[in-house]
Image (cartoon, rainbow, N blue to C red):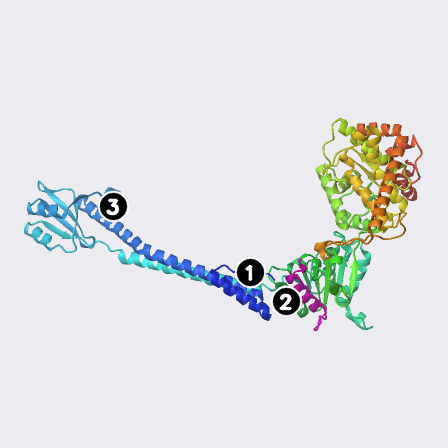
């Protein structure tokens, strides 16, 4: 059970934890009902503390500000009076044009007694006096004297001495400045309170919406995709078109007692078009469509995912009949109580709620669930049963016909030269998914634009296939021992592809390096029928092992045991895997027709902690000997073939070093000049048959 402690004092944290524990024991409350309001209270407390601090600061600084502005005003008034008394100009001159000297109150009294004062200007509001001394009958420049609050003796002596005495009324700005400061403070407090209320409202709204569904809703989905845009998965399209027809014309099915399927599960490898099919359903159905990812249900807090499932189905039932699409449902539908740690409470509660909504006590008539996953082996068995997912549609890798249809769909928006055969591209890409084929034509279009060509040619198609399957092309190697060794290694593979009867024919061999540490490669043209069906023969597997060991065999035959390199490390992994599967899974060894091993699931995907052996130690020793025997025999066969054709190997290596790439048909011409080669379905023969069937003059091309 996951715990969450809010930010606050230790007592508050303990209080919340106790409440949470009590809620867990009694089953009451939603986790969001105590976590988020606690955060809101802490935010409000911090905001109120900030407001009080700001209030204290303003209380202290506002009077000081007012007093400072008052002193500035008094100084301006004094300067104005000085300017008026000395120059007769208005008192609102700039402050830097008004100057004055100072006298003490005692000095002023002494000068009054001595009769040296000509005039005194009093400023009662500022408790200030400007004194003009008598200089031969003329007034001197003013002196400033600070007065007491009451100065009766000064006024009496001045009148007794006949000194001109005047009282100046200065402008008192204290009340105005105080009012402005108070209004400013009140405005800041109001703005702060409005901000606090607004944040509290937002937090409350988020707390209430935390368990709401985040599904995207469309009354009539306009995805821009229809079934015409989906190719290569005709069986899946037919199954899903029935669902769409049921939604549009339910009377056709209900008339004979048929019920609408409650759930459809799309299963298949990545990139085969499962999500594209869902978009096509949304575009064709004409009913409300909800779409959501499985990961959007799962949250850190237990119970949130279940709340979102309830909210999603509540909205869906209000809009029934409708379609709910859940992409990557394995994120929430994995097996319960399995794997390391025994499962996850949040995911299991979400799955339990999903099971109840799909086929529980209440039912969900009118709501069709369509889900997609590429890992059906990890889904919970209760989720897979009929009544929840009535149909499981496998969207597998496309066959030759499917690849051809997919390429034709994507070629609509591409400029392709007339000489480029879509059929040839489809035959060269067995094992490609729909996304791979779309990426292939897009990469070819990018290369065409980079090379400033008007349309996609066969050269761009070939480069795009190599870029996707092997890697980016790098700068060619300089002439060196490494380049010659790589050439012998790749020629060893290519020659065995050509001479072995059951091996797939060579497409091309090159020593131009590729990204990922690939120094060169020998590329085959796979038999698309065998790849699509998955029915590999024992002879094909053995020849593949011999061909895979051809690189290491060429290194040993040419350079000796001491000069073999680690370049065949990946080849050896492939050989070990194929040989072991022949012995333990396919029954293609002397141990008999027994399946001694099975594919074990990963522990993190709902499987056991350790895979237990299904045979004894004695049988394990026999398996090891059988695997080693297959690998050794195939390696000896590869060495023998290359040893018998050493002259041909040297000739091919010299030409490969000169040209850096040899196409398959040219390679076979050179081999035919030395030794006969087995009859196979070579690409040039296939092209000649196609040209002959079309009545083209290209049928005469060899």
In which quadrant is the N terminus drawn? Answer: bottom right
199 up-or-down from 100: above or below: below
- Tag 3 or tag 1, which sits nearer the N-term? 1
Q: Nearer the viewer, mark 3 or mark 2?
A: 2
Prevailing SS of the magenta stretch: helix
In the structure shown, which secondary structural element does the residue marked by tag 2 occupy?
helix
Q: Separation of disc 3 and disc 2 at Cα?
A: 75 Å
Q: How far separated are the C-alphas under marks 2 and 1?
A: 24 Å
Quadrant (top left, top right, bottom left, bottom right) of the C terminus: top right
Q: In this view of the protein, can residue 215 be seen by the observer?
A: no
Magenta extent: 341-366
Evaluate whether residue 672 shows in this view.
yes
Task: Say what secondary structure mark 3 lies in.
Answer: loop
Q: Position of residue 549 (x, y in %)?
A: 83, 38
Asked if residue 358 is among those painted magenta in the image, a careful observer would answer yes
Residue 643 pos. (x, y %): 88, 31
Q: State the residue in front, 526 or 347.
A: 347
Report if residue 554 lies within the magenta region: no
Q: Which mark is residue 641?
A: none
Q: Which residue is mark 3?
A: 93
Residue of label 1: 4
Identify which residue is drawn at 24% across, 42% down. Answer: 97
Q: Nearer the viewer, residue 91 or 436?
A: 436
Q: Nearer the viewer, residue 71 or 495?
A: 495
**If you read the primary sequence from the N terminus, does the residue marked by circle 2 or circle 1 appear first?**
1
Residues under numbered marks 3 and 2 in contact, where contact means CB atoms less than 8 Å apart: no
């Amino acid at each position: 059970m996951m715990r969450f402690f809010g930010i606050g004092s230790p007592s508050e944290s303990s209080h919340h934890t106790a409440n949470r524990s009590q809620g867990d024991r009694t089953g009451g409350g939603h986790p969001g009902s105590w976590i988020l309001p606690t955060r809101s209270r802490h935010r409000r407390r911090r905001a109120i503390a900030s407001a009080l601090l700001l209030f204290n600061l303003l209380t202290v600084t506002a009077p000081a500000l007012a007093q400072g502005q008052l002193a500035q005003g008094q100084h301006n008034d004094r300067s104005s009076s000085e300017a008026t008394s000395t120059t007769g100009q208005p008192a609102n001159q700039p402050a830097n044009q008004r100057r004055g000297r100072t006298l003490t109150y005692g000095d002023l009294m002494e000068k009054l007694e001595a009769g040296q004062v000509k005039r005194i200007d009093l400023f009662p509001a500022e408790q200030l006096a400007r004194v003009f001394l008598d200089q031969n009958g003329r007034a001197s420049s003013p002196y400033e004297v600070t007065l007491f609050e009451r100065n009766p003796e000064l006024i009496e002596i001045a009148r007794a001495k006949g000194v001109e005495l005047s009282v100046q009324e200065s402008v008192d700005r204290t009340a105005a400045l105080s009012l402005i400061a108070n209004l400013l403070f009140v405005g800041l407090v109001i703005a702060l309170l409005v901000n606090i209320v607004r944040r509290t409202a937002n937090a409350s709204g988020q707390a209430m919406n935390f368990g709401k569904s985040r599904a995207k809703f469309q009354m009539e989905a306009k995805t821009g995709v229809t079934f015409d845009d989906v190719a290569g998965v005709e069986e899946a399209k037919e199954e899903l078109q029935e669902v769409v027809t049921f939604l549009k014309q339910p009377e056709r099915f209900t008339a004979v007692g048929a019920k609408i399927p409650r759930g459809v599960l799309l299963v298949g490898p990545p990139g085969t078009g499962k999500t594209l099919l869902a978009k096509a359903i949304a575009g064709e159905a004409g009913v409300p469509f909800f779409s959501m990812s499985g990961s959007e249900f799962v949250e850190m807090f237990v119970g949130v995912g279940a709340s979102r499932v309830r909210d999603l189905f509540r909205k869906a039932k209000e809009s029934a009949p409708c379609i709910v699409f859940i992409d990557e449902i394995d994120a929430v539908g994995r097996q319960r109580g399995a794997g390391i740690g025994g499962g996850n409470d949040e995911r299991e509660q979400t799955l339990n709620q999903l099971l109840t909504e799909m086929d529980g006590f209440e039912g969900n008539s009118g709501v069709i669930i369509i889900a997609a996953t590429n890992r059906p082996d990890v889904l919970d068995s209760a989720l897979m049963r009929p009544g929840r997912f009535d149909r499981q549609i496998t969207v597998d890798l496309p066959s030759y016909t499917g690849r051809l249809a997919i390429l034709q769909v994507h070629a609509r928006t591409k400029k392709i030269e007339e000489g480029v055969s879509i059929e040839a591209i489809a035959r060269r890409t067995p094992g490609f998914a729909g996304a791979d084929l779309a990426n292939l034509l897009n990469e070819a279009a990018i290369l065409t634009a980079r090379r400033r060509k008007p349309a996609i040619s066969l050269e761009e198609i070939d480069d795009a296939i190599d870029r996707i399957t092997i890697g980016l092309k790098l700068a060619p190697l300089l002439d060196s021992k490494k380049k010659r060794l790589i050439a012998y290694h790749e020629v060893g593979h290519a020659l065995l592809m050509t001479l072995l009867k059951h091996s797939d024919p060579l497409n091309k061999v090159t020593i131009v390096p590729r990204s990922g540490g690939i120094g060169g490669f020998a590329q085959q043209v796979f038999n698309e029928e065998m790849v699509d069906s998955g029915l590999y023969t024992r002879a094909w597997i053995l020849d593949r092992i011999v061909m895979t060991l051809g690189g290491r065999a060429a290194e040993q035959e040419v350079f000796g045991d001491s000069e073999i390199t680690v370049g065949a490390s990946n080849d050896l992994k492939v050989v070990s895997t194929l040989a072991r599967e022949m012995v333990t899974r396919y029954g293609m060894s002397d141990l008999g027709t027994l399946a001694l091993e099975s594919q074990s699931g990963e522990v993190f995907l709902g499987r056991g902690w350790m895979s237990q052996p299904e045979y004894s130690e004695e049988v394990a020793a026999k398996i090891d000997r059988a695997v080693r025997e297959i690998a050794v025999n195939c390696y000896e066969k590869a060495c023998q073939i290359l040893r018998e054709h050493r002259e041909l190997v040297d000739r091919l290596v010299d030409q490969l070093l000169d040209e850096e790439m040899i196409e398959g048909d040219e390679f076979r011409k050179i081999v035919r000049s030395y030794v006969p080669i087995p009859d196979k379905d070579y690409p040039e023969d296939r092209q000649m048959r196609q040209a002959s069937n079309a009545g083209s003059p290209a049928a005469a091309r060899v």
